[in-house]
Amino acid sequence: MSRVTLRPLVEADRARVHEILSAPEVSQWWGDPDEETDSLLAKAEAQAYAIEHNGETVGIIQSWEEASPRYRHAGIDLAVHPGHYGLGLGAEAIRILAQRLFDRGHHRITIDPAAANVRAIHVYEKLGFRRVGILRDYEQGLDGTWHDGLLMDLLEGELKGELR
């Protein structure tokens, strides 16, 4: 049985989402908390979910989907509040969402952490994601400098671990 549930983000989540994205350990990877919060709640191109544990929103996870039959795949982004690091809650959320995406007919899922985000990369590799390559000068940091990203992917059948 899973310790986390995913539910669609709603406007009432704005303050908590902003709090999560404002934590220095998160904003260094996600960027401007105001812009990111607005983007997550706009639901324009991605589906965003609250990650709940024991009735508390501990993080956010979103997915986007490429529907073209020749390239059909999906991508995931994740942020967990640092007060909940090390509990495996983000990994469980990824397992749940990845399985939903595979069940929807996707054969591959990508994730693209900052190349310097060692903590996230470690978690993704434990789940079965593989390094595909470096995306040079992939994203601009809050300080205006460009940083590399790491493209990782997971094929259906490679997802590791079980929900607790």
Image: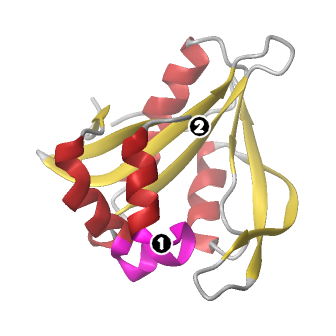
Figure check: 17 above or below 156: below
In three-dimensional space, the C-alpha distance between marks 2 and 1, rounded to whole angstroms, equals 32 Å
Disc 1: CA contacts within 10 A as few (<14), some (14-19) or many (>=20): some
Task: Specify the amino acid type for callout 1.
Answer: Asp
**Which residue is labeled 1 in the image?**
32
Q: Magenta stretch mostly in which secondary structure?
A: helix
Give yes or no for contact between labels 2 and 1 (Cβ–Cβ under 8 Å): no
Which image quadrant for residue 19? bottom left
What residue span does the magenta drawing correspond to? 22-33
Q: Position of residue 7 (x, y in %)?
A: 28, 32
Q: Is residue 85 visible?
A: no
Residue shown at 69% from the left, 31% from the top:
158
The outermost residue toward the left is 55
Figure check: 147 above or below 126: below
The label shown at residue 160 is: 2
Residue shown at 76% from the left, 65% from the top:
149
